[in-house]
Amino acid sequence: MMQRAISAADAAALIPDGASLMFGGFMGVGSPDRIIDALVARGARGLTIIGNDTAFPGVGVGKLIDAGCVAQARLSHIGTNPVTQKKMLAGEIQVDLIPQGTLAERIRAGGSGLGGILTPTGVGTVVEKGKKVIEIEGHAYLLELPMRADFALIRAREADYNCNLTYRLTATNFNPLIAFAADCVIAEPDEIVPVGVIPPDAVRTPGILVHHLVERPH
């Protein structure tokens, strides 16, 4: 399905200012770097980003922070990115810190059509503020609501032109998960191969979930 393969610039053009984005990556490993670079080049503004972290300055999604593309960040930590910290303290970016396991399960709930999850993580802490506490068999749990986004930006190892995706080692991280929880999924594979090359049991994200592939420039 060649019509589903687009350039990074075309992918960035699909994403309007003010959109919400889920992104793959852990400290920049497994980040959709070409799409990120294209968003910076386009001058995107007002984005809400959802993912594990903001990596480092100039690395992965940290480039969006550096360039002023982000209005809100919903993630697990910002400790490795001093630019994110400074912009948060200056009121330039709203940062919502979410425990990593809770973040993953909220995304999973959003992708599965669930009404939320119950977790003991954060009970009795600042994380509890504004959330419903439910007691089950003498134990307190927070009701955490599902999370979805307008777009999911995925980094894959291989894709075929039916948009089936594979991943490699720790670069997998959040990438397969977010494919279920966005209205439009854009995948950036390292390599696009003919249909039939990827063994069926190697497919981690089926092509039915993916709307566009970003081709490597020649």
Image: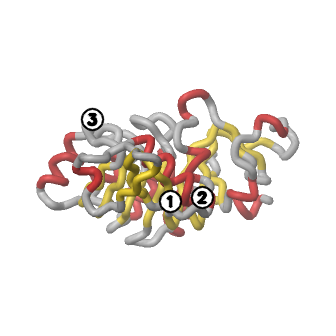
Query: Which numbered dot is residue 111?
Result: 2
Out of 128 and 85, give the one closest to the viewer.
128
Out of 110 and 38, give the one closest to the viewer.
110
Crowdedness near tag 1: few (<14), some (14–19) or many (≥20) residues, C-alpha within 10 Å: some
Q: CA distance from mark 1 to mark 2?
A: 11 Å
Q: Secondary structure at mark 2?
A: helix
The type of residue carrying mark 1 is: Gly
Residue at 33% x, 56% y is: 73
Query: Where residue 40 sits in the image (x, y, percent)?
Result: 38, 57
Mark 1 highlights which residue? 116
Looking at the image, tell me whether mark 1 or mark 3 is earlier in sequence order: 3
Query: Where residue 112 sits in the image (x, y, percent)?
Result: 62, 58
| Above or below, 202 relative to 142 | above
Q: Are marks 1 and 2 in contact (CB under 8 Å)?
A: no
Mark 3 highlights which residue? 80
Left or right: 7, with 196 as reference point: left
Out of 6 and 87, give the one closest to the viewer.
87
